[in-house]
Image (cartoon, helix red, strand yellow):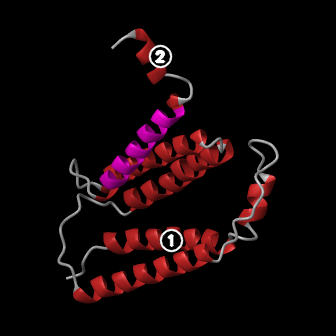
Amino acid sequence: MNLESLQNLISPTALPDMMFYVFAALTLLFGVLVVANPFSRNPVTSAMFLVLTIISMAGLFVLLHAFFLAAVQIIVYAGAVMVLFLFVIMLLDLKEEQRRKIKLFGLVAGLVSVGTVISIFVKSLASVKTDAAPPALEGETYALGKLLFTQYTLPFEIVSVLLLVAMVGVILLSKKKLE
């Protein structure tokens, strides 16, 4: 490989593309490790992989020049929400996860609720108008806030409900079985 082909490979225009693939691959890898963690059955390990997933997603936001969203992603989700999840895990004194038998009613109810949330999400995305003008200044948050609390109110509230459901799910999954 000669020097000119190496310079073309590392050109300033190719660097954001390569970084996108790196951050996207890391986001997918860490996201899979949150759910299917082969290293440990400890929920704290999964929470740490979730922090790495959030940081990788913040890298994708930086590549899109959405610096405010990247900072909010790190501060709010990797900071506040993950600290809250870790406190819940530690206060409930969760040990390594033990395999449970899957109950048919719980499986059906879970699938129905996931299908309902997906259908609401798809319906709300289909009804959104995409004629929003790009922000005048890079990093301006006024247009983002206006869109978030006018056109995207339903998806914003769906995300908040999903966070609430995740918290309740952690509490229910961690309950000790009374015998």
Q: Closest to the observer: 167 or 34?
A: 34
User: Circle 2: is it few (<14), some (14-19), or many (20+) Cα within 10 Å?
Assistant: few
Q: Is residue 30 magenta?
A: yes
88 versus 66 height, above or below? below
Q: Residue at x 38, y 56 (%)?
A: 90
Q: Quadrant for residue 112, please give it.
A: bottom left
Between 161 and 178, the one lying in front of the other is 161
Closer to the camera: disc 2 or disc 1? 2
Percent position of residue 156, x then y: 63, 68
Q: Which residue is mark 1?
A: 162
Q: What residue is shown at x 45% (from left), y 69% (from top)?
A: 166
The residue under label 2 is 7
Q: Is residue 98 highlighted in magenta? A: no
Tag 1, which secondary structure?
Answer: helix
Nearest the eye: 132 or 47: 132
Q: Secondary structure at mark 2?
A: helix
What segment is highlighted magenta in the picture?
16-33
Say which amino acid is labelled 2. Gln
Q: Residues within 10 Å of mark 1 (few under 14, many from 20)?
A: few
At 28% from the left and 83% from the top, the residue drawn is: 107
Say which of 146 and 162 sits in front.
146
Residue 115, position in %: x, y? 42, 81
1 sits to left or right of 66: left
Q: Is residue 159 shown above or below 47?
A: below
Give the amino acid at mark 1: Leu
Q: Percent position (x, y) of residue 98?
A: 19, 65
**Residue at the extreme bottom:** 105
Q: Against 15, is 66 above or below?
A: below
